[in-house]
Amino acid sequence: MTSVTPRPAGTLVVPAPRRASDLEQVPGPPRRSSWWASPGGSAVLGLLAATALTAVAVRGLGDDSYISLDYARTLVEHRQWGLVPGRGANTATSPLNVWLLALGLGVTGTVTGAVWGVLAAAFAVVGAGMSRIGRAIGASPLLPAVSLALLATSPLLASAVGLETYLGVAVVVAVAVAALEDRPVLVGVGCGLAVLVRPDYVVPVAVVVLLLLRARSPLAWLRRTATVAIVAGTVALPWHLWAWFELGGFVPDTFSFKTNPAAGHVPSLIAMFDSLYWSRTPVAVVVVGVLVLAGWTVALGAVAIGLRRAPRAALGAPSSPAAVIVAFAASGTAHIVALMVINAYPQAWYYGPLVAGCTLATAVVLEMRSHRAVLTGVAVYCVIAGLVAGQGGVPWRAADMNSNFTDAATYLAIGRDVSAVVGSAPVASPGEIGALAWGCRCDIVDQFSARGNARPLLDHRYDLGGPLSRAVLRLNARHRPDVPAPVPAYKLRYVRGDDPMPSEVVRTWWAISPQTGLPFRIVLVAAS
């Protein structure tokens, strides 16, 4: 274990190196440690963490996770890109997640196998990557284990199992490793994969590259970043060009669904956070917020130390602990700021890069010295976070920070019943479609599955934009097919409280809101 002495009291709020200058220095060759702390052993720890998280979370997947699974199943069974067979769509935000889920479905034939496969790959990369980062900066061999434990027990991150959030964390870690190890081609590959995870993930990896990519001169740095950009484009552009011509959009249609420039400059990610999360899951928000605040604190402390000791090189060498700490915290912060600028709708997983980046920054500082009190504190925090994330019982029926109207099991059962009634006739979704479509295997339609239904939303987003925004949207929609909206024979509707029952009711089901515990009805009506 690398021995690093503590820094002056009061500099940071969590344990850190003994001297401020330790954050700026590049450590010498790492000492030999146990096999489980090696990259291979840490990857195995990642597999174990993914197995445990899958076991408790797979029954409580969010509806958007099932949208990704629907795309994956359609790809495997019908070789089509769409949520339901026979209807092309461009609403899968993460093509890489869909491809990996499709691989898992093809190999295992089960939701559990597909979700575990993606999560296991992501956690293995995070474990191995944090091991390599720890060796580069002289951190404790426990860094990978601590990082995995904090990430796996986060109520917010765990609520996004089945989505691309953990994949994004893995790519950020991989880019950081490649940058620290001076491999610009691999950095470019990682950046290209980040865009395939989600287009907006270009922001966190760009910050990591900016802070960690080495160069002896500004000109050399420009050459290296050019290499990164060319390789990243080679990886990501083929898919986006294909989507532009074949699916009708260089970026997914969900960009238009979930951004609102008319909201002004009061970011909806903040303005709507209270009603969606703080008022419903305050304990989970506090648990997650602790690590976000800790990450910001240690990053600001690292910058302050660098400015005090070396104003011209505030972060020290790229492989210094300070640079890594700031890179992780800044990557997530820059991402959330970018989403605020475009007024993205506050889905829980949109905060994923921020939470993960600050969590990893905190883990690095904690493990600059392996102290029994630190490890005890981490263990206690993880237990509390895990209990909060799974307070509805284990395995979860619904994740704690899940804002869906009801849980997946209810939707899946209703979907199977609907299939028996509607047969091959189109049926309109009630507002959430992922788990219903998975259970129904029928022609269920809304803006996520049918291009014709998406058209009004895309046009509305265009009308809200300014001159530059409209020019970009026009270019994006250059090859968009003009497909009429399907005419559903049936409609699913939510009926809450004292809402009047619609006419022509064919079937009624009771459901319970995971957030409020209140019952409501989902009804199937014949379309007039």
Image (cartoon, helix red, strand yellow):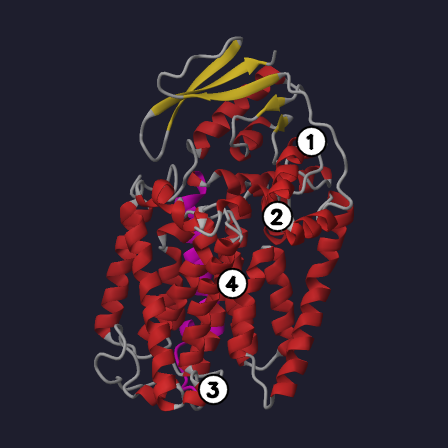
From the top left corner, tell me how far across and down residue 508 is, in percent: 46, 15
| Location of residue 219 by image quarter | bottom right
Q: Amino acid at mark 4?
A: Ala
Q: Which residue sits at x=36%, y=90%?
A: 309
Residue bearing the label numbered 4: 170
Q: How far, Cα to Cα, is label 3 from label 1?
A: 53 Å
Secondary structure beneath dot 3 equals loop
Whichever of callouts 4 and 2 sits on the residue coming sooner in the sequence is 2
Residue 329: x percent and y percent? Answer: 42, 68
The label number, if any, that marks residue 98 in the structure image: 2
Callout 3 crowding tier (Cα within 10 Å): few <14, some 14–19, many ≥20: some
Residue beneath disc 1 = 452
Image spot of residue 203 (x, y percent): 55, 63
* Rendered-image quadrant of the N terminus: bottom left
The amino acid type of the residue labelled 2 equals Val
Q: Is residue 427 magenta?
A: no
Q: Which residues are magenta?
A: 30-59
Name the residue type under label 1. Gly
Disc 1/disc 4 C-alpha distance (Å): 36 Å
Mark 3 vs mark 4, CA separation in Å: 23 Å
Question: Relative to 411, does residue 66 appear above or below in the rendering?
Answer: below
Earlier in the chain: of badge 1 and badge 2, it is: 2
Q: Please tell me whether mark 2 or mark 3 is closer to you in this view.
A: 3
* Most foreground residue, 327 or 384: 327
